[in-house]
Every structure is written in C-alpha cells, then in structure tokens.
Amino acid sequence: VFDQGLGCRVLSLVTIAPVSAAVLSLTPNSLAVCAGSSSTVHISGNTSTFSSAPLTGLSVSGNTVLVSPLSPQLFTLSGAFNGCVASATLLVTIAALPMPTITVNNYSFCVNSLLQMQGSGGSQYHWSGPGGFFSSLQNISTVLSSTAAAGTYTLTVTGQNGCKNASTANIAIGALPKGGLKGVRSAGCTPLC
C-alpha cells in the first residue's frame, strides 16, 4: 500500500508461490563398521548436491553413501532442493576385528607326515591352503601326501560382530630320501649262491 500524499492509496499485490520443502533421510541412520572396512547407507528424499561434515569418511554416488570411517564419528549430510537445504545425521561406530591364532604341531615336515592345526579367536572358521585345500572346521588334521601340500595356510575367522580377520602359517615339506639295497654275489655262501 502506497500513500500518494493526496489521500489516495495504491494497492499492490504480490503472489508468493509455495516451494516444496527439502527432504533428506538416511537408512540406516546409525551403524557399526568393521575396522578398516566400508559400509553403505541409502539416501531417500528429493535433495541433491550433497555435502558432508566432516569432509572425510563419506562419499556419495547417486542415492548411496559409502562410509569409510577411521574412527567413531557423527556425520551430517546436507542436500539442496529448490534453494532449500535439508540435513540428516549418521552415527558410525567402529567394530573391533577378531584376533585369529593358529597353533601348529610343526612347521617343517616330511612327506606322509600328519599336519595338525588348531584355530582360535572367532566364532566361525575357514581354512584354505595349497592345492585347493579348504575346511570350515576349527581344528584340522591332514596327511601331507606330497611336497605340493607345502606353502601358506590361511585361517579366516568371523567374530560375533560379523567382522573378519585372517592369519597364516607357512608349512615346509621335504621329500623322502631315495634309497635302495645293493647285493654282492659271494660264491660258496648261502643263501646268496
């Protein structure tokens, strides 16, 4: 409304168009990540042009967030829509890795010897080794039938929190010595006559 000074007034109307609010949410909004690993979070809403605080530990691709934290962190992800900004938080904790241990009855064997290895430090166990060797038992026992069984045996354990870690044992196998009997013919001696 404007007063022209003559008692007249001019009325001006302004139309304000409503703008849709920016919407941003994360699923899940809290998670535990195994130490040294990554995890993903889903973005929903109508926002784009994302930014995060802190800047390191999060990367966005489409509607997926890759979370790679070095320490426990509370992240804030912000996105824009029609000039409006929405934010969502993500609480990330670090889950400890299990500590696998291998106990071996020996590290150096002859062919046809018995290799025994015991695993500990997890709730699930997976062994792998030379020649396609594998086992899901906690403790293994196998006959080393050839030198091809020599090499690195790996034990991967899974902890109660679902995190995995591995340990190795290097096994050496020596071939059996080759020997023979050589007889000498002695005349007049029995039973070698």
Image (cartoon, rainbow, N blue to C red):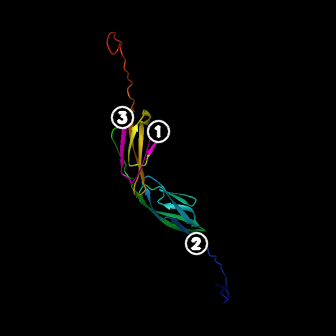
Q: Nearer the viewer, residue 75 or 7?
A: 75
| Quadrant, the C terminus | top left
Mark 1 is surrounded, within 10 Å at the Cα level, by few (under 14), some (14 to 19) or many (20 or more) other residues, namely few
Q: Nearer the viewer, mark 1 or mark 2?
A: 1
Mark 3 is surrounded, within 10 Å at the Cα level, by few (under 14), some (14 to 19) or many (20 or more) other residues, namely some
Place residue 74 in its image quadrant. bottom left
Place residue 144 in its image quadrant. top left
Work out whether 53 lies above or below 188. Answer: below
Work out whether 162 lies above or below 171. Answer: below
In percent of the image, x 38 and y 29: which residue is there? 176
Residue 21's tag is 2
Disc 1 marks a residue whose amino acid type is Gly
Where are the magenta residues, as a range? 112-134
Q: Nearer the viewer, residue 97 or 30?
A: 97
Q: Secondary structure at mark 1?
A: helix
Sooner in the amino-acid sequence: mark 1 or mark 3:
3
Q: Nearer the viewer, mark 2 or mark 3?
A: 3
Work out whether 193 lies above or below 80. Answer: above
Q: CA distance from mark 1 to mark 2?
A: 61 Å
Q: CA distance from mark 2 to mark 3?
A: 72 Å
Q: Secondary structure at mark 2?
A: loop
Task: Identify residue for label 3.
Answer: 109
Disc 3 marks a residue whose amino acid type is Phe
Could you tell me residue 143's position as x and y percent?
39, 38
**Residue 155 magenta:** no
Sooner in the amino-acid sequence: mark 1 or mark 2:
2
Task: Identify residue for label 1.
Answer: 131
**Residue 115 magenta:** yes
Sooner in the amino-acid sequence: mark 2 or mark 3:
2
